[in-house]
Amino acid sequence: MPRPRRCRWVGFNPNFSYFAPRERPTGEVILKVEELESLRLKDLLQKDQTEAAKMMSVSQSTFHRILTEARRKVVDALVNGKAIRVYGGDYTLRNLCRDCRSEWGDFAERCPSCGSTNIFYRGRGRHGRCEGR
């Protein structure tokens, strides 16, 4: 019996969840929220694999597997004219300012309350269950 999956920390909540070609899509690809997060960290923010894995609270090899699967799905959608739906996954979204103890959900470089950069990205601790499922 395989071990249960650990929650992956996600630093933002996507504003858009569906992308489709202008013409009629030939199918649909489901991109999990943690797969989108791996693309964001590695390709958009250009974090190295070690730092990105640490930000998601996974090992480097797990991060690489998540990233590889995300890239495969996006390329499949682009090449084959499929829609992309961002949905589900094993993730937790939570941040904490270490200076003012403020908490919020979306990724931010600075605390929305006090402007501090002393931020702790953490999960909610739901007895091993992720909030993203």
Image: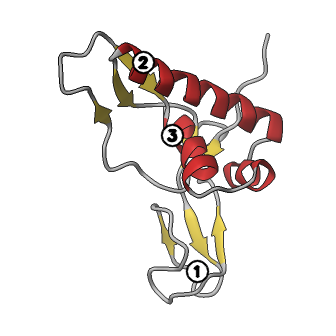
Q: Which mark is residue 116?
A: none
Which kind of residue does numbered mark 1 sit on? Arg
Residue 61 image offset from top left, x and y in percent = 81, 34
* Residue designated by label 3: 36
Which type of secondary structure does the marked residue at label 2 adopt? helix
Which comes sooner in the sequence, label 3 or label 1? Answer: 3
| Left-right relation of 64 to 117 | right
Decide: is 45 above or below 49: below
Q: Are marks 3 and 1 in contact (CB under 8 Å)?
A: no
Residue lying farthest front? 79
Q: Nearer the viewer, mark 3 or mark 1?
A: 3
Q: How is the image coloured?
A: secondary structure
Say which residue label 1 marks.
101
Residue 104 horizontal/vertical position (percent): 47, 67
**Is residue 125 visible from the viewing direction of this image?**
no
84 versus 105 height, above or below: above
Q: Residue at x 51, y 40 (%)?
A: 36
Q: Tell me the residue at 57%/29% (across/down).
A: 71
Closest to the observer, 115 or 42: 42
Looking at the rendered structure, the kind of residue marked 2 is: Val
- Amino acid type assigned to the residue bearing label 3 in the image: Leu
Which numbered marker is on residue 79?
A: 2
User: Which residue occupies the extreme left position in the image?
Assistant: 23
- Is residue 17 among the parts visible in the rendering? yes
Which residue occupies the foreground of this view, 119 or 85?
85
Circle 3: is it few (<14), some (14-19), or many (20+) Cα within 10 Å?
many
Q: Counting residues from the N terminus, which is met first, the one under dot 2 or under dot 1?
A: 2
* Position above or below: 121 against 109: above
Under circle 1, the secondary element is: loop
